[in-house]
Each structure stands twice: as C-alpha cells, then as structure tokens.
C-alpha cells in the first residue's frame, strides 16, 4: 500500500478518531474503507444500514478488553505509519521536488 492510496481526501474526523484509539464505524465513502481495513475499523454496507449498525455496536460492546486494545493499537499504528506529519511532509517534499 502506498501513501498516495490512503492520503486521497481522508476525512479528518476519521483520522482524529483513529489517532485517539477509537474504533470507527463508517459507510464505504471516499477512502474510508481502505483506511479502516488497515486500522481495525468497521465498514458497513448501505443496504440494511440500521440493522448492520446495531450489529456492529453490539459486537463492540461484547468484545473483551484484549480485543478492544488490539483495535485501539491498530488504529494508532495506522495513523503513525501513514498520516503522521513527518511521514506526510516527507511524501509532500518528494512530490514537490520531482
């Protein structure tokens, strides 16, 4: 996966939530599915959205602490690897100088 694959218009609120270790539940819009695939989030289909949201929330409530910590760690690691300011600034510098 390249930085450009996930840096295309990522919603700031999604990145902020991941940076704080929150589990993000979203619909498949923009680059969100790609981001959440690597960050331990949940992508819900538009079809039967209310039912799927209910199921996802129930699953998160029932997860044990170890699973929630794994999700939280995955989210923070994703942000550090792909959206940390040092990573993005190096990428932008490379793009600008080419």
Image (tube, rainbow, N blue to C red):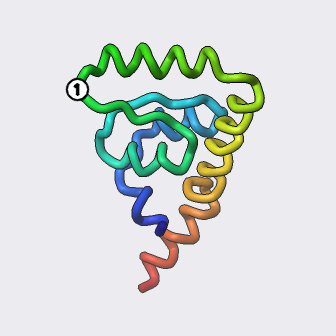
Q: Is residue 2 left or right of residue 63?
A: left
* Extreme residue toward the right, this view: 66
**Residue at horizontal 47 percent and vertical 34 percent from the top:** 42
As drawn, 96 above or below 1: below
Q: Is residue 80 above or below residue 22?
A: below
Which residue lies at the image location 47% right of the left edge and 22% below the top edge? 56
For mark 1, give the secondary structure.
loop
* In this view, 51 is above or below 80: above
How many marks are shown on the rendered structure?
1
33 on left or right of 18:
left
Query: How far across and down, in percent of the image, does residue 83 sit?
Result: 56, 54
Residue visible at 31% across and 39% down in the picture: 28
Report the side of 33 relative to 85 (left or right).
Answer: left
* Residue pointed to by mark 1: 47
**Can you tell which quarter of the image residue 6 is in?**
bottom left
Residue situated in front as seen by the camera: 59 or 87: 59
> Can you give x and y, in whole percent of width and height, for residue 64 in the image?
72, 23
Residue 80 versus residue 58: which sits nearer the camera?
58
Circle 1 residues within 10 Å: few <14, some 14–19, many ≥20: few
Residue 5 on image: x %, y %: 40, 62
Farthest residue toward the bottom?
Answer: 98
Residue 63 image-quadrant placement? top right
């Amino acid at each position: 996966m390249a930085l450009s694959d996930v840096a295309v218009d990522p919603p700031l609120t999604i990145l902020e939530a991941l940076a704080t270790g929150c589990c993000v539940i979203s619909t498949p819009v923009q680059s969100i599915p790609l981001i959440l695939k690597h960050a331990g989030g949940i992508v819900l289909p538009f079809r039967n959205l209310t039912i799927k949201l209910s199921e996802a929330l129930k699953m998160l409530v029932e997860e044990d602490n170890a699973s929630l910590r794994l999700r939280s760690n995955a989210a923070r690691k994703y942000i550090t690897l792909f959206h940390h300011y040092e990573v993005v600034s190096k990428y932008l510098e490379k793009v600008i100088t080419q």
